[in-house]
Amino acid sequence: MELEFTKMHSTGNDFMVVRWPEGVDLPGSNVIRGWADRCRGVGFDQLLVLETSEQAELAAFYRVFNADGSEVEQCGNGARCVARYLIGDEESATLTLGSLAGTVEARLQSNGDVTVNLGEPDYDPRTVPLRANLKSGRYQLDLENGSVEFGAVSIGNPHAVIRVDSVDTAPVGILGPELQSHSLFPEGVNVGFLEVLSEAHVRLRVLERGAGETQSCGTGAAAAVAVGRLWGLVGDHVQVELPGGTLIVKWLGPGYPLWLSGSAIRVFDGRIEL
């Protein structure tokens, strides 16, 4: 059986988007890992599977699978690419998507970028989830390669954010995997390394669960701004510079939803054997 797919990316964070046929079992981890292989498959950070929703208000329900085959709750760049995929050639549109993390409102901007409402960031350790007795703005943890201070937040998926002097020299490959696999995070965690240039401009690198360091991470950008606001480092409109490009995060603070904006690019269409 052949499946049609579309390859997309947002600031270098790349996806394979598939409308999944009804009555067909979802692909197993081995199949997903094969498709994700950049030499022998399509190559991607995440697979985005679109399913028909029984809820009339939803344009589609999307599921997110990392390159290692694991399923995750949310993907900010992925949600924007799904919206762009569904909108097609329309010049303006607003639609609602469903995901394991809840509903997501998406809007097409006049410049072709897509904005999504990722809801209000949640610092409750039970939501992240984080094994901590009390909610705190900052957590301290001794790791094998040194002590680390971080903020923790859920953007529909778990994030830990570490402030660094420079993302160029940040120990992403050292502290990231240690924190990511620590028992403090029972479901793992995405780890962001945040460099603050001003209250309106930051730089960021992210080590994602199941995908490694990616060129960009939408929920990672949102988490960095959420933690940065909690620490009094950034304002409500922030340019987040990632290795693959720039995303814009707008968040007025507690009680308001967070909006993520950026490009969503269709690269090519293809077919692959299931």
Image (cartoon, helix red, strand yellow):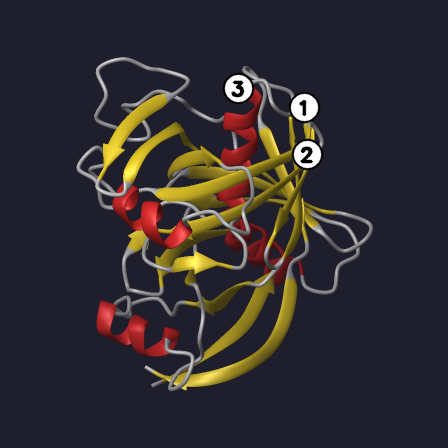
Q: Mark 3 points at which residue?
A: 231
- The N terminus lies in which quarter of the figure? bottom left
Q: Position of residue 108 (x, y in %)?
A: 72, 49
**In the image, residue 210 above or below residue 2:** above
What kind of residue is marked 2?
Answer: Val
Question: Residue at 67% across / 23% down in the picture?
Answer: 235
In the rendered structure, the answer to whether residue 271 lies left or right of residue 262 reads left
**In the image, residue 43 above or below residue 9:** below
Q: Residue 192 carries which label?
A: none
**In the image, residue 120 above or below residue 102:** above
Looking at the image, is mark 3 or mark 2 nearer the viewer? 3
Residue in the foreground of this view, choosing between 217 and 97: 217
Q: Is mark 1 on a helix, strand or loop?
A: loop
Question: Residue at 36% across / 45% down in the picture?
Answer: 73
Q: What element carries label 3?
A: loop
What kind of residue is marked 3?
Answer: Trp
Q: Where is residue 268 in the image (x, y as percent from the top left)?
A: 60, 78
Q: How crowded is mark 2: few (under 14 residues within 10 Å), some or many (20 or more)?
A: many
In the rendered structure, the answer to whether residue 243 lies left or right of residue 239 reads left
Separation of marks 3 and 2 at Cα, in angstroms: 14 Å
Q: What element carries label 2?
A: strand
Q: Where is residue 119 in the image (x, y as percent from the top left)?
A: 52, 30
Farthest residue to the left: give it: 183
Looking at the image, is mark 1 or mark 3 nearer the viewer? 3
Q: Are dots 1 and 2 in contact, CB under 8 Å?
A: yes
Count of numbered circles on the image: 3
Q: Mark 2 points at which residue?
A: 238
- The C terminus lies in which quarter of the figure? bottom left
Q: Is residue 224 visible?
A: yes
Question: Residue at 48% across / 42% down in the picture?
Answer: 193
Q: Name the residue under label 1.
A: 235
Separation of marks 1 and 3 at Cα, in angstroms: 11 Å
